[in-house]
């Protein structure tokens, strides 16, 4: 009986008193340390956690969490706006990690009231992603792993910048929406990737993060490369190509420089953003990256 | 009101047609890219006459592949919705009637939403088709429930239409609630009505529907006049009221279905154009139908042109402009002219 008592007390024995952190939106969060049951409310958070080496500790993910493959098998607790509070209560997590770009303040407030420590990250640019990896590394007790990841990403980023430095920047149009046509503007991750990859986003100066551009504007700005951000790499592509082929007046169409790119790699603030950057650089400056 | 003679109809039609041509020309000269007015019109005329020469490739692409088909499609839809509005107002004897009142638009929307949720793109052929099928099913259902004792009564039809429309709206809300973020955006964009993807194929597809329906309805103009003066009167004067009601309903619904399938839901046109034309030219359908078509075409082309240029490069939904400009104008008309008791 004493043994079973000890066994049931073991988790709390090895967990010290909650550590106080300040999250990326300034909230004070007291986290039982190290957290053993973590719920992620967004796909980028899930990717970061898995990359940090966690797996068993991840008790729940959002329905959009599709990477890595293991994430798909975790218990799902809802979407950005529709959270399954019952499931979360059932899971009794030590820590919930949310994103400022998707999960609502309301939702975080409710989670707090229910007594679950909730840490919010809010990366706003490439360096912000690295910072989030660093912060989360500290919160889940994987500081060394976080540092290694950040190091690796920085190294690969440097390599891309080196190879594309000084080269002429092709004009790029990144299409993320079809009807209406939506592209990326200043402030979005994809826009900063275009810049880092040695290209010039034709929608860079639009004031919105995801501006809508009319076809007239696109024709006027004559992009040399068109990137289509797709979550569905199969059927859509051919028809979209057909649509674009009507506009041979656009250099990108004339020269057959229309490429598909996985949207998860370029607009998700997670470690794979470096994969997105490398892929983009290969597309914009193919001569530089021939193996 | 002056008596409607063929001469009067012809004169007014010519006048309104010239107005329409002017609106079309105006619309192709403005846009977010500057192409001079003279240049734009020359490019258009040369293209129609089969000549070449003027303008860079970019300018020709913009005028001939973007602005011109957009103007034509908007004109077709504007004419179609206006005539449809005229017919529904006559059929239902209700000044509040518009092409969407009998649920056809909701049926179209359900068709389109199902297509979008199944992964069809708005640029594909399948989506307008799905939307059209949705309309047809709705037309059939409303027609079936709108009959009483084998006849169509305006009020029964109205009730059946409104209730079916409500049910379909509930369905739409359901679909919206289970949609993902990306689909939601596409759905809402479609629902708001838009001409930015106008192309000649869409024009070719809906032109026959609209022309055919217009010709048929115009040929029955006199009979429609008689129906409005009283069912008994009409019957005694030899009008097959029941048959006319049925066929008018079908043609007007078809125009609506065709229009909505290519550009989504654009409101207000089918409501205020018939009333405005009635206030200016009178309630005789021999004048009302062609004038509504011409005025509706001009109105929607002008609204769409405003929508895409007012806050360029941002494009406003055309429905915003039709309501914002159409509403006050109609109120102005109401106040400065005697309201003709027609319905």
Image (spheres, rainbow, N blue to C red):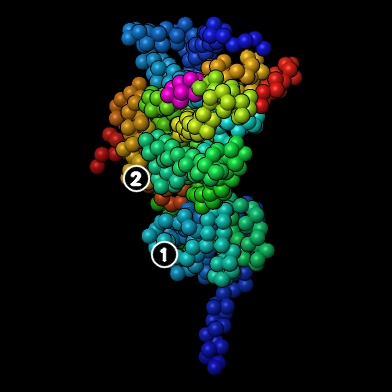
Q: Quadrant of the C terminus of chain B?
A: top right
Residue A192 shows in this picture: no
Q: Name the residue furthest left.
A: A291
Secondary structure state at the residue bearing disc 2: loop
* Residue A213 location (% of width, % of height): 49, 29
> Image point 50% across, 20% down: which residue?
B218
Secondary structure state at the residue bearing disc 1: helix
Instruction: Report crowding for label 1: few under 14, some 14 to 19, many 20 or more residues within 10 A (C-alpha).
Output: few
Instruction: Report crowding for label 2: few under 14, some 14 to 19, many 20 or more residues within 10 A (C-alpha).
Output: some
Which residues are drawn in magenta? B210-219
Residue A113 shows in this picture: yes
Mark 1 belongs to chain: A
Left or right: A69, with B229 as reference point: left
* Residue A112 location (% of width, % of height): 65, 62
Dominant secondary structure of the residues highlighted in magenta in the image: helix
Residue identified by numbered label 2: A233
Find residue A108 and report its image quarter: bottom right
Front-most of B212 and A223? B212
Front-most of A54 and B2? B2
> Image point 53% across, 26% down: which residue?
B239
Mark 2 belongs to chain: A
Left or right: B275, with B111 as reference point: right
> Image point 42% across, 61% down: which residue?
A71
Position above or below: B66 against A228: above
Q: Quadrant of the N terminus of chain B?
A: top right
Residue identified by numbered label 1: A73
Q: Are marks 2 and 1 in contact (CB under 8 Å)?
A: no
Query: Distance of mark 2 from mark 1, alpha carbons?
Result: 22 Å
């Amino acid at each position: 009986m004493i043994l079973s008592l000890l066994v049931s007390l073991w988790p709390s024995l090895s967990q010290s008193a909650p550590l106080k952190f300040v999250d990326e939106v300034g909230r004070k969060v007291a986290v039982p340390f190290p957290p053993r049951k973590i719920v992620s409310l967004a796909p980028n958070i899930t990717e970061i956690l898995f990359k940090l080496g966690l797996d068993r500790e991840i008790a729940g993910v959002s329905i959009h969490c599709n990477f890595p493959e293991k994430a798909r098998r975790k218990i799902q607790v809802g979407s950005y706006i529709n959270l399954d509070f019952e499931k979360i209560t059932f899971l009794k997590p030590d820590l919930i990690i949310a994103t400022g770009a998707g999960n609502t303040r309301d939702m975080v407030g409710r989670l707090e009231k229910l007594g679950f420590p909730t840490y919010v990250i809010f990366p706003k640019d490439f360096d912000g992603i690295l910072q989030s990896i660093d912060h989360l590394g500290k919160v889940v007790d994987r500081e060394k792993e976080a540092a290694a990841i950040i190091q690796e990403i920085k190294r690969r980023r440097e390599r891309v910048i080196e190879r594309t430095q000084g080269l002429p920047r092709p004009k790029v149009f990144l299409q993320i929406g079809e009807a209406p046509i939506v592209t990326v503007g200043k402030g979005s991750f994809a826009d900063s990737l275009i810049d880092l990859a040695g290209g010039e986003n034709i929608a860079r100066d639009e004031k919105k993060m995801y501006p809508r551009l009319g076809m007239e504007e696109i024709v006027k700005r004559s992009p040399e490369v068109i990137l289509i951000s797709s979550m569905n790499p199969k059927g859509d592509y051919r028809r979209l190509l057909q649509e674009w082929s009507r506009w041979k007046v656009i250099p990108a169409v004339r020269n057959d420089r229309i490429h598909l790119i996985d949207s998860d790699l370029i607009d998700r603030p997670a470690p794979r953003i470096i994969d997105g950057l490398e892929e983009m650089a290969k597309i914009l400056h193919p001569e530089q990256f021939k193996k | 009101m002056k008596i409607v003679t063929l001469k009067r109809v012809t004169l007014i039609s010519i006048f309104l047609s010239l107005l329409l041509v002017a609106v079309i020309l105006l619309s192709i000269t403005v846009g977010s890219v500057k192409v001079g007015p003279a240049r734009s019109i020359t490019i258009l005329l040369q293209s129609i006459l089969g000549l070449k020469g003027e303008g860079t490739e970019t300018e020709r692409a913009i005028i001939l592949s973007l602005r011109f088909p957009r103007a034509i499609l908007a004109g077709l839809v504007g004419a179609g919705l206006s005539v449809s509005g005229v017919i529904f107002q006559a059929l239902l004897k209700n000044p509040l009637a518009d092409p969407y009142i009998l649920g056809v638009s909701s049926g179209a929307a359900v068709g389109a939403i199902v297509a979008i949720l199944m992964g069809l793109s708005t640029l594909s052929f399948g989506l307008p088709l799905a939307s059209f099928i949705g309309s047809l099913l709705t037309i059939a259902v409303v027609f079936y429930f709108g009959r009483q004792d084998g006849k169509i009564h305006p009020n029964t039809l109205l009730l059946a239409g409104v209730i079916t429309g409500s049910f379909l709206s509930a369905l739409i809300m359901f679909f919206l609630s289970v949609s993902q973020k990306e689909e939601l955006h596409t759905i809402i964009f479609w629902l708001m009505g838009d001409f930015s993807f106008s192309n000649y194929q869409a024009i070719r597809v809906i032109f026959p529907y609209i022309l055919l329906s217009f010709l048929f309805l115009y040929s029955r103009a006199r009979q429609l006049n008689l129906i409005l003066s009283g069912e008994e009167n009409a019957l005694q004067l030899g009008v097959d009221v029941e048959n006319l009601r049925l066929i008018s309903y079908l043609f007007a619904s078809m125009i609506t279905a065709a229009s909505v399938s290519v550009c989504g839901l654009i409101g207000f046109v089918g409501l205020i154009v018939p009333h405005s034309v009635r206030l200016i030219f009178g309630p005789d359908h021999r004048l009302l139908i062609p004038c509504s078509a011409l005025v509706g075409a001009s109105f929607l082309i002008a609204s769409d042109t405003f929508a895409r240029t007012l806050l360029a490069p941002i494009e406003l939904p055309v429905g915003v402009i039709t309501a914002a400009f159409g509403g006050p104008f109609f109120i102005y008309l109401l106040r400065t002219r005697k309201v003709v008791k027609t319905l």
